[in-house]
Amino acid sequence: MKYGRVDVTAPEQCPPEGRLPDAGPRVPADHLRMVFYRMGLDDKEIVALSGAHTLGRARPDRSGWGKPETEYTKDGPGEPGGQSWTVEWLKFDNSYFKDIKERRDQDLLVLPTDSALFEDSKFKVYAEKYADDQEAFFRDYAEAHAKLSDLGAKFDPPEGFSLEDDDTSTAPADEKKEQTTPTPEPAAAAAAPPPPTSEPEPEPAPAAAPTPEPVAAAVATATADDNNGAAPQPEPFVAAKYSYNKRELSDSMKQKIRAEYEGFGGSPDKPLQSNYFLNIMLVIAGLAFLSSLVMN
């Protein structure tokens, strides 16, 4: 992940609608290449990204594709219905490629663009690989997803930044290169080993993946002394401790909430309407009273 993405502030800053690939074009493989090649993605990345269909459902009332309901979607979760590509359509794995290859279950969706992954000779190489090797799929999908996500985005700083377990994590990459190792204390310098000989040094081992910031902070505060010599235990996670202390919603989020609220008849600018049930009861009581007067 690269952080620091700058949000857009107006609709005209967004790409135009209608750039997603069609599900049933005349020549599915050529259509997929036309869409993804334009963005600088290759055949391997096209097949890997197609594997995202391992999650979710299609609904005929929304996209025109899929069954209204299947054995795997009739009970939800969420709104029941639709047709999924996989049996466990909330689990991210490589079952999408396995199911398309085997096609044993008529309750699972296979779009023309899905079939193309095993019908096109160049696509098939990667589709077969991902059906047999889930780790290869995970690795290639992660790289393709990150590449696709960064396309057309602007970052601040321009090169973005990563989240690490030190205080320099938000510094731009160029500034990090310029930062030098702090000078050791005199005692530490005196105890330093002698300079290396002319023998070549062994290559350093690959750096371990950085520890997530909240976990590193929690572990750092728990020492053996705190636990009577026992192994350190991380302190309970408290979300507020790692928040940005923002108590006010952004204007764009307020607009979205307002639009959804007004969509079903509400308005934050209007007072609560009167109790219609109480009004009806009062009208009925009044009519009953008038009727009794007339009858008398």
Image (cartoon, grey):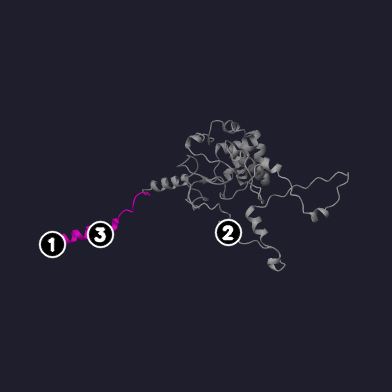
Q: Nearer the viewer, mark 3 or mark 2?
A: 2
Secondary structure found at label 3: helix
Crowd rating for badge 2 (residues with CA inside 10 Å; few <14, some 14–19, many 20+):
few
Q: Looking at the image, which residue is at 41% across and 47% down?
A: 258
- Circle 2: residue type: Val
Q: Is the magenta stretch mostly helix, strand or loop?
A: helix
Q: Name the disc covering residue 293, or none.
A: 1
Residue, far right: 198
Q: Looking at the image, which residue is at 22% across and 57% down?
A: 283
- CA separation in Å, label 3 and label 2: 51 Å
- Circle 3: residue type: Met
Crowd rating for badge 1 (residues with CA inside 10 Å; few <14, some 14–19, many 20+):
few
For marks 3 and 1, the one nearer the N-term is 3
The residue under label 3 is 281
The residue under label 2 is 238
Figure quadrant of the C terminus: bottom left
- What span is colored magenta in the figure? 267-296
